[in-house]
Image: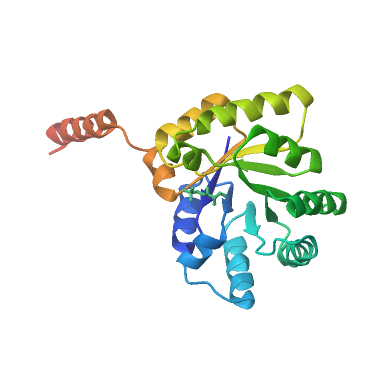
Amino acid sequence: MKFFIDTANLAEIQEAVDLGVLDGVTTNPSLMAKEGIRGTDAVMAHYQAICDIVDGDVSAEVIATDFEGIIREGEALADLHPNIVVKVPMIKDGVKAIKCFSDKGIRTNCTLIFSAGQAILAAKAGATYVSPFVGRLDDIGADGLGLIAQIIEIFANYGYATEVLAASVRHVPHLIQCAELGADVVTCPLNVITGLLNHPLTDKGLATFLADHKKVNA
Ligand code: E4P
């Protein structure tokens, strides 16, 4: 399973890279705004900075919602760096744009997926990734992980090459369950990745090992 970090914060991206387990980055307009990145030049420079840090796919989201606008923005983003994956929302013009990008060899991540039907459409259009939002479905009392399982089963039925990128992964159990289900990728904040390190018995065991070593090496 690939680990993507879901942030536009360069320090967090660098920390995940330094841990040695990062395969890519996803961003969205809210995450870019959180970092205070505004204006096309600043946005493009920030994506370039992310690509300079990470050797892996970097999802960069279009803002346009009309076909021509999505194509224009997506082509500009794709031209920035070979690792850029154009993130396109699950809307009618988005699906048309994904098909067009796919025909041109531009890789895409279809975002804001909340149903199996949306995932099928995106896969048929040739999306590289689909991003079902686990946490946001859980937020409204729906079954986010159930959707991941459903999409994985459907894609396997037809041998779709589109990868299932579990997004809106909010905590360690989410990530583990996505791994059990066989999601191709998870994207999550840094604290979820570093949260995988933690177990009280590890802390206790290490403290004992070090104390025993000290006793005979004092
Ligand atoms: C996915 O690409 C989105 O950026 C993200 O995972 C959304 O997560 P959230 O629901 O925690 O905002």
> How many numbered badges does the structure rendering display?
0
Residue 183 placement, left or right of 74: left
**Residue located at (63% from left, 54% from top):** 59
Q: Nearer the viewer, residue 111 or 216?
A: 111
Residue 63 placement, left or right of 170: right
Residue 18: x percent and y percent? 47, 52
- For the N terminus, the image quarter is top right
Location of residue 129 (image quadrant): top right
Residue 29: x percent and y percent? 56, 62
| Picture colour scheme | rainbow
Q: Nearer the viewer, residue 96 or 130?
A: 96
- Identify whether 5 is placed above or below 210: below
Q: Nearer the viewer, residue 67 or 168?
A: 67
Residue 160: x percent and y percent? 77, 32
Residue 148 placement, left or right of 107: left
Q: Is residue 182 visible?
A: no
Residue 67 placement, left or right of 43: right
**Residue located at (64% from left, 59% from top):** 60
**Residue located at (64% from left, 71% from top):** 44
- For the C terminus, the image quarter is top left
Location of residue 87 (image quadrant): bottom right
